[in-house]
Image (spheres, grey):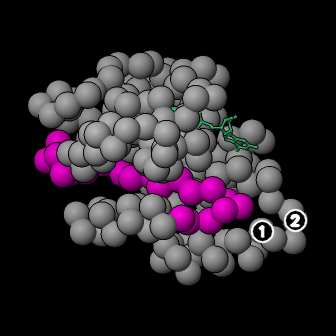
């Protein structure tokens, strides 16, 4: 897919603000610091469109980016960042759940990003349960594949498959390995 334009449209912090204009959405979800912002930027080939920060847990909004004036890429808040208050964590969790249960996202695709080297964590598994509970299918992207040793690629893919029930795509926001595969999966 050829990216002609990608622009930030809005950040949403609470209910009743979702974009309800009938356009399809692709939502990216994952642990804080897994590289969500970097993945979105690299897929769109736009450095700095989504702020990638060295301070994990900074994204506390749901950010909407309109791509080719046609489809939204949605950056959901990262989960599992320890250094924020219980209350803030609960708020983030609710924001994610609210998105996942909004009727407007019926035609939304979900991309779950896990760390290729670490594999799915307990929190990722919880998120998978949530997605299943709400009947959302999802694509698994294993980011930071550049950190994997050559001979552990297949082992990690197998591990991720066993833990998520999905065939993961090895991806690197750094080298853009897997970009075509992820894009065609998103737009298939
Ligand atoms: N080596 C490597 N580092 C990455 C990759 N993607 C993201 N990172 C780094 O991981 C950190 C968190 O990235 P960010 O996109 O802000 O994560 P987010 O919190 O999930 O949005 C940053 O230091 C990135 O440079 C990748 O594919 N390979
Ligand atoms: Mg981010």
> Tag 1: Cα neighbours inside 10 Å, few (<14), some, or many (≥20)?
some
Which quadrant would the C terminus be assigned to in this image? bottom left
Is residue 100 found inside the magenta-colored segment of the image? Answer: yes
Q: Is residue 100 left or right of residue 179?
A: left
- Asked if residue 85 is positioned above or below residue 54 in the image, the reply reads below
CB contact under 8 Å: marks 2 and 1: yes
Q: Could you tell me which residue is drawn at 20 percent across and 31 percent down?
A: 14
Q: Secondary structure at mark 2?
A: helix
Q: Residue furthest right?
A: 150
Label of residue 110 in the image:
none
- The answer to whether residue 111 of the structure is visible from this angle is yes
| Residue under label 2 | 150
Q: Is residue 40 visible?
A: no
Q: In the rendered view, tell whether residue 56 sits above or below residue 165.
A: above
Q: Nearer the viewer, residue 114 or 136?
A: 114
94 sits to left or right of 153 = left
CA gap, disc 2 to disc 1? Answer: 6 Å
Q: Which residue is mark 1?
A: 153
Identify whether 94 is placed above or below 135.
above
User: Eyeballing the image, is 56 above or below 141?
Assistant: above
Residue 134 position, x and y percent, is 22, 63
Residue 31 at x, y percent in the picture: 50, 49
Residue 49, how many percent across, how many down? 54, 21
Name the residue at 86% across, 63% down.
Answer: 149
Q: Ligand 1 is located in which of the four quadrants?
A: top right
In this picture, which residue range is highlighted in magenta? 99-121
Element under disc 1: helix
Q: Is residue 101 left or right of residue 62?
A: left
Q: Residue at x 35, y 19 (%)?
A: 9
């Amino acid at each position: 897919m050829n990216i002609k334009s990608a622009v930030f449209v809005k950040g949403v912090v609470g209910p009743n603000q979702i974009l309800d204009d009938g356009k399809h959405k692709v939502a990216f979800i994952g642990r804080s610091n897994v590289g969500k912002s970097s993945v979105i930027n690299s897929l769109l080939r736009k450095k700095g469109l989504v702020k990638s920060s060295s301070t994990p847990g900074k994204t506390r909004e749901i950010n909407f980016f309109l791509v080719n004036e046609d489809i939204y890429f949605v950056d959901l808040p990262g989960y599992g960042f320890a250094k924020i208050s219980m209350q803030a964590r609960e708020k983030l969790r609710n924001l994610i759940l609210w998105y996942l249960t909004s009727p407007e996202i019926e035609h939304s695709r979900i991309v779950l990003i896990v760390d290729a080297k670490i594999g799915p964590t307990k929190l990722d598994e919880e998120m998978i349960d949530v997605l299943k509970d709400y009947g959302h299918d999802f694509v698994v992207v294993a980011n930071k594949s550049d950190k994997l040793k050559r001979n552990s690629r297949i082992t990690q893919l197998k591990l991720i498959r066993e833990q998520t029930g999905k065939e993961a795509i090895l991806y690197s926001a750094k080298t853009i390995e897997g970009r075509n595969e992820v894009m065609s999966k998103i737009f298939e």
